[in-house]
């Protein structure tokens, strides 16, 4: 059994919050806080030096915001980034997920939710706190009846499950051209470029799940 602890870096500009998070996390037998950062620039620097398993990152950071810092971290390191912030606006959440966030928690999350989220993301999972998931669900970013109709949602779900446009066309008894048109509308609504990105999006939102 591997007893190596999960190495954590806490990046937040509030010292009291960093201290509180450190106490919560280091109370866990499988976790170790190996560093802290008070600015976005320092978070990137410390991550490159320490190579943590998980970076717990705020979005509102001096010098450089957490989303840009996260982009730089995930681009060059295998560290996973868990956002912990007061921001629950849909466009901020979407930008963070697109930039590479493995999880997104609101700062009013409970201690056990944070601990559980760390364990989930370090093993490759994705976590959203309940209010963040609710905000995403309410955003109408996933095609719903009324914003393109049932057919567009059917196309979305089939593509998300990995079916090719021709397979979708055969299943829905429409032309491949119609499927391509729906697909383009869906990608534009979600701010995505490829079907692969659409599948990842659907997994993150819990629309489809891996076995």
Image: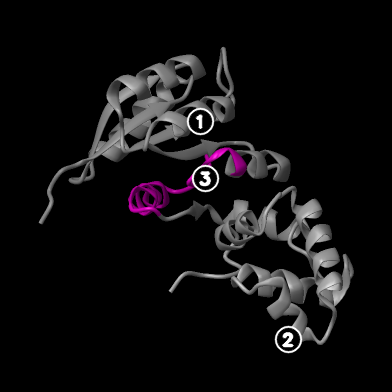
Inspect this view and state whether residue 125 appears. Answer: yes
Residue at the spot 57% in from the left edge and 70% down from the top edge: 208
Q: Which residue has dot 3 on it?
A: 105
Residue placed most toward the observer, 108 or 59: 59
Residue placed most toward the observer, 142 or 151: 151
Residue placed most toward the observer, 80 or 128: 80
Crowdedness near tag 3: few (<14), some (14–19) or many (≥20) residues, C-alpha within 10 Å = many
In this picture, is 74 found above or below 164? above
Magenta extent: 98-124
Q: Which residue has dot 2 on it?
A: 171
Alpha-carbon span between mark 1 and mark 2 = 41 Å
In the image as oriented, which residue stretches furthest toward the top? 63
The x, y position of residue 210, in whole percent, is: 47, 69
Of the image marks 3 and 2, the number of the one nearer the N terminus: 3
The x, y position of residue 145, in whole percent, is: 84, 72
Q: Residue 174: within the magenta?
A: no
Of the image marks 1 and 2, the number of the one nearer the N terminus: 1
Which disc is residue 70 wearing? 1
Inspect this view and state whether residue 145 appears. Answer: no
Q: Is residue 100 left or right of residue 24?
A: right
Instruction: Look at the numbered disc 3 and give the secondary structure of its residue.
Output: strand
Crowdedness near tag 2: few (<14), some (14–19) or many (≥20) residues, C-alpha within 10 Å = few
Q: Is residue 170 left or right of residue 112?
A: right
- Are the two marked residues, 1 and 2, in contact with CB atoms closer than 8 angstroms? no
Marks 1 and 2: which is nearer the front? 2
Marks 3 and 1: which is nearer the front? 1
């Amino acid at each position: 059994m591997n007893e190596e602890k999960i190495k954590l870096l806490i990046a937040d500009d509030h010292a009291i919050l960093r201290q509180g998070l450190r106490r919560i996390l280091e109370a866990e037998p499988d976790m170790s806080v190996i560093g802290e950062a008070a600015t976005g620039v320092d978070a990137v620097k410390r991550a490159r030096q320490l190579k943590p398993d998980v970076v717990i990152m705020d979005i509102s950071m001096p010098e450089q915001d957490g989303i840009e810092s996260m982009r730089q971290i995930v681009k060059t390191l295998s560290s996973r980034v868990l956002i912990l912030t007061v921001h629950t606006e849909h466009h901020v959440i979407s930008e963070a997920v697109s930039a590479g966030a493995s999880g997104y928690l609101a700062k009013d999350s409970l201690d056990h939710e944070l601990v559980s989220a760390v364990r989930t993301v370090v093993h490759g999972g994705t976590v959203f706190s309940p209010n963040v998931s609710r905000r995403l669900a309410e955003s109408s970013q996933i095609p719903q009846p009324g914003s393109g109709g049932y057919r567009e949602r059917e196309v979305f779900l089939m593509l998300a499950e990995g079916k090719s446009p021709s397979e979708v066309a055969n299943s829905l008894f429409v032309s491949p051209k119609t499927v391509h048109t729906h697909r383009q509308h869906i990608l534009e609504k979600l701010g995505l470029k490829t079907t692969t990105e659409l599948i990842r999006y659907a997994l993150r939102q819990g629309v489809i799940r891996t076995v």
